[in-house]
Image (cartoon, helix red, strand yellow):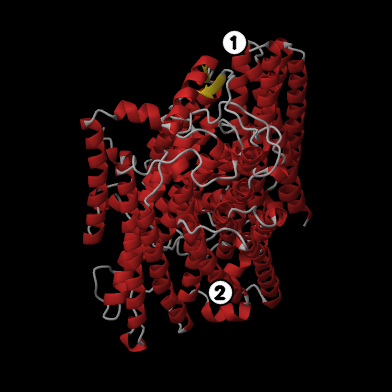
Amino acid sequence: MSVQEEALEEKRLLSKTSVGFWLYLMTDCLLFATLFATFAVLRDATAGGPAGRDIYEMPLVLAETLILLTSSFACGLALIAMTQKNIRQVLIGLGVTFVLGATFLFIEVSEFTKLISEGHGPQTSAFLSAFFTLVGTHGLHVFIGLLWLSVLAYTIWRRGITSKLTRQLTLFGLFWHFLDLIWIFVFTVVYMMGVVR
Amino acid sequence: MIIDWGFLLGRLSLDALPDNIVTVLGALGGLFGVLLIVGLLTVTRRWSWLWKTWITSLDPKKIGVMYLVVAGIMLLRGLADVVMMRVQQALFATNGAGPIDADMFQQVFSAHGTIMIFFVAMGIIFGLINLIVPLQIGARDVAFPLLNSISFWLFFAGMALMNVSLAVGEFSTAGWLAYPPLSGLEYSPGTGVDYWIWALQIAGIGSLLSGVNFLVTIFTMRRKGMTPMKMPIFVWSVIGSMLLVVFAFPILTATLGMLTLDRTIETHFFTSDLGGNPMMYVNLIWAWGHPEVYILALPAFGVFSEIVPVFSRKRLFGYTSMVWALMAIAVLSFTVWLHHFFTMGAGANVNAFFGIMTMIIAIPTGVKVFNWLFTMFRGRISFKTPMLWFMGFITTFTIGGVTGVLLAVPGIDFQVHNSLFLVAHFHNMIIGGVVFGAFAALAYWWPKLTGFRLHEGLGVAAFWSWLVGFVLAFGPLYILGLMGAARRLDHYDASLGWQGLFVVAGVGVMIILLGVFFQVLQLAYSIWKRDELRVGTDPWDGRTLEWSTSTPIAEYNFAALDAVEQRDAFWAMKSSHVREEATKFSDIRIPKNSGFGPGIAAVAFVGAFAVIWYMWWLAAVALVVTIVLAICAGMREDVERTITAEQVAAIEKKLWRTRRA
């Protein structure tokens, strides 16, 4: 196969995988839409338990938001470095993304454990079931993202930036930004609208 | 220190083995079947052959065949459930006795619905798509071959889980859609609903991945020159169906996930206390469930839209309107879900909206019916079995459509909801539409895939048995429904005078079984006499690209990728005589076999089984193994092998020579 054909094949592969990944993201978006709809319906079903405004710690949530947004910025820098084949910068970018993502997850998990230890677990009311599930599903996605990121970073460190890794890193970028987008909605619909009312 | 090893088995104990005679027989039968297959494979030393040629294969044609085999076997199991229900209702329901008690009866109808929709109809649809779509768009493969294998094996794992419930534990008694609070922990504390959930969840994720896979395949891998409006109409119907999969299945995944949480960690999404909202479940499950109906129906429409032109020797009438109708149905199918529960308190205006939207769907469907009829008009129709199935379809499906419009009127629905009228209606659509479509497709494409056709006489006998049996089995149900017979009855009062009609329905089912017998006979006989039934590459004088390649089809589908110039591409090639056998070949790359599909599915099966029985340690192990497998699958290198130009030339020479001989 000539170099030209090789490049064409690579382009075709990238377009195939990106179209597929966009479609997958859309299905994930619908999964979240279902959870959001359920949350919206069950938001006031507190059954004598606490409502959102009683338990949300907004400063922490704002910190989470900023941390996750910054991690996306770092991820973006890593992607730019990838196009320049700068392995060191890619790894630094991914490292920062990982640390920020892990911090986000740590804050979320400590928020959850605190709520559960105070007796406000997901079994308390329909509202808390929906809250834990929606926010927790986002957290689970972040966790999977961190796993994926570690594997990618490790492989890049071992093998350098191959065409396959370029493809995967591009997809990871899409995934990470997607999680940001979902979080914006979580922040708005769950937290902000929860304390306003 | 004494360690309690009980946690190893969770809630699994010897009590989980069946005690009812019917279940014992079913479980023993299943076990015997599996042992027989295992024994045969061992005696004939076919394990390595099975592993290399089928289980690890990434060839969509082979995956398609495996889907159809599983669906066929599950069809027989679903039919066994039908026989039990019909025998009970026809002979024993008036005196409260009979071989099947109320609890068992509930398991049987729940299993029947679940199996027929998820493991028969879905299996048939995905089998057909795997077999036909890559060929019709003139491609050599699907977009993501490994993902395709994973999808199939997840489907298989769901099926296996569903059937294991027969021998270990119990199946759901909550109907095929498991409405809470009945399906909640409080009223269904056993393992039945958990089996239902996980069988669907695993198979559903497989379907979702398939949906993405085939959309990307159709979007990016069409033959050069095949612009959207030049695609075969079956491909369009698959786009519609797969778009619905991609939009609807995430709702199922999330909904089943929430029901799982309700049942395992005791959250309160759908419970009747602490703010839970069972109606939310009903809304969500139908927001998936109604599009699901069209996921099944659209490809069947596509099949008939291929068959009618070929057997009328005319172009498809109104191709463009067909495409628009398909897409309109796909979009509208998301706007009607509430018609499944008009009586559950949404209010008059909401009901009116959903009633009208439901009736509107009849318009694009009517467009399709008229297009088929106009395609036949002044055509030179040959009434081969595929065409007979179409004639059966158009009649039963239209009747089903009319009763559907009746049900769409909320006022009428209040009278007949949850009655046998409804049961008759949706069987009219699913059997008359999807199942007849599948049989037509089998008769139509069989010679392409095997090189010989199916015996015509036995096919005709099967068709008439099915059609007559269908009318007898479901006609009485309309009448019974209008008389007030609720669905899912294991007994009723003799003074109602319903028994005669139930007996007629039972006779109908027996005639359908006769049809199934003819079909099995047809398959066996045709395979036995395959040399007499051998045909060329293009036995029906086909119009689309799948008929242009050799039979049997090479693993790379097409040796040369000639550009497509117009709709009905192969017909055009034939009539302009431009088609010459390719003489110059180039290297072809095809994917290597992979064991990841069966591997991931096996782990999913074990994990789900562990969760059902509360063996949490095993579930954790399965989760970790899944993650490791997923990482390994993502890191695979060197996934393709090359068939060189010389090899291609040799294969082609051999394949085309067999045809001429």
Q: What is the quadrant of the C terminus of chain A in the image? A: bottom right
Asked if residue A113 is positioned above or below residue B558 in the image, the reply reads: below
- Judge the density around disc 1: few (<14), some (14-19), many (≥20) Cα neighbours within 10 Å: few
Query: Can the viewer see residue A64 in this picture?
Result: yes
Asked if residue A151 is positioned above or below residue B79 in the image, the reply reads: above
Determine contact: label 1, label 2, CB under 8 Å.
no
Q: Is residue A192 left or right of residue B594?
A: right
In the image, what residue occupies the spot 38% across and 69% down? B469
Between B139 and B485, which is closer to the camera in this rendering?
A: B139
- Spot occupied by residue A54 in the image (x, y as percentages of width and height): 69, 52
Query: Distance of mark 1 from mark 2, alpha carbons?
Result: 65 Å
Q: Is residue B147 left or right of residue B462?
A: right
**Chain of the residue under the numbered disc 1 shown in the image:** A
Between A9 and B337, which is closer to the camera in this rendering?
A: A9
Q: Is residue B434 left or right of residue A141?
A: left
Asked if residue B82 is positioned above or below residue A159 in the image, the reply reads: below
Asked if residue A98 is positioned above or below residue B77 in the image, the reply reads: above
| Rendering quarter of residue B88 | bottom left
Mark 2 lies on a secondary structure that is helix
- Spot occupied by residue B618 in the image (x, y as percentages of width and height): 38, 36
- Judge the density around disc 2: few (<14), some (14-19), many (≥20) Cα neighbours within 10 Å: some
Query: Can the viewer see residue B611 in this picture?
Result: no
Residue with the mark numbered 2? B403
Residue with the mark numbered 1? A158
Label 1 is placed on what type of residue?
Arg
Between B395 and B653, which is closer to the camera in this rendering?
A: B653
